Image (cartoon, rainbow, N blue to C red):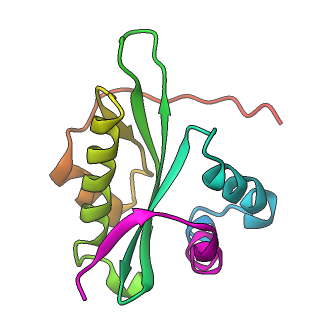
Amino acid sequence: MPDAIRPLAGADRGAWEALWSGYLAFFGEDPANVTETTWARLMDPAEPVHALGLFRDGELLGVAQYVLHRHTWTIGDMCFLVDLFTHDGVRGRGIGTALVEAVFERARAAGAICVYGMTAPDNVAARAVYDRLGELFDQVVYRKVLV
């Protein structure tokens, strides 16, 4: 059976959560703090947050989560690729690339003018995908944690 990429549905919660927990652990985050809210947002059609899953033989192998949003410098929306993650055992086999390209298609269909994302400088696996599909945007990102 060929790979299928589609939006996540309620029945995908368990498989998504297994991937999600590993993804958050990779970045040293606590999934208990955000999992319920994130899933609720992904399932709410009124939210600008979306998730696509890549399935092979019914098994969820990877997820791309993105946000469509307004921007002050453009008329069209922008798309922030927030999260891209796959099962450890399938990294380097095109799953991430297929998911990013699917986000490109969804963003284009929604009228977005670009897709952008970020990752840790030492995240070699993610950077290998992003280096092939986009250009490194020379900006410095600052943040101030408010809570």
How many numbered marks, from 0 up?
Answer: 0
Q: Residue 80 location in percent, x, y?
A: 44, 38
What is the quadrant of the C terminus in the image?
top right
Q: Is residue 30 left or right of residue 114?
A: right
Residue visible at 36% across and 26% down in the picture: 139
Q: Residue 32 location in percent, x, y?
A: 80, 65
The segment highlighted magenta reads: 1-20
Q: Quadrant of residue 71?
A: top left
Residue visible at 31% across and 65% down in the picture: 96
What is the quadrant of the N terminus in the image?
bottom left
Say whether residue 15 is magenta: yes
Q: Residue 95 location in percent, x, y?
A: 29, 72
| Extreme residue in the right direction | 147
Q: Is residue 99 above or below residue 71?
A: below
The reply to whether residue 46 is in sight is: yes
Q: As rendered, which of 101 and 133 lies closer to the eye?
A: 101
Residue visible at 25% across and 38% down in the picture: 136
Q: As rendered, which of 50 and 80 lies closer to the eye?
A: 50
Residue visible at 32% across and 61% down in the picture: 99
Say whether residue 14 is magenta: yes
Q: Quadrant of residue 27?
A: bottom right
The reply to whether residue 124 is in sight is: no
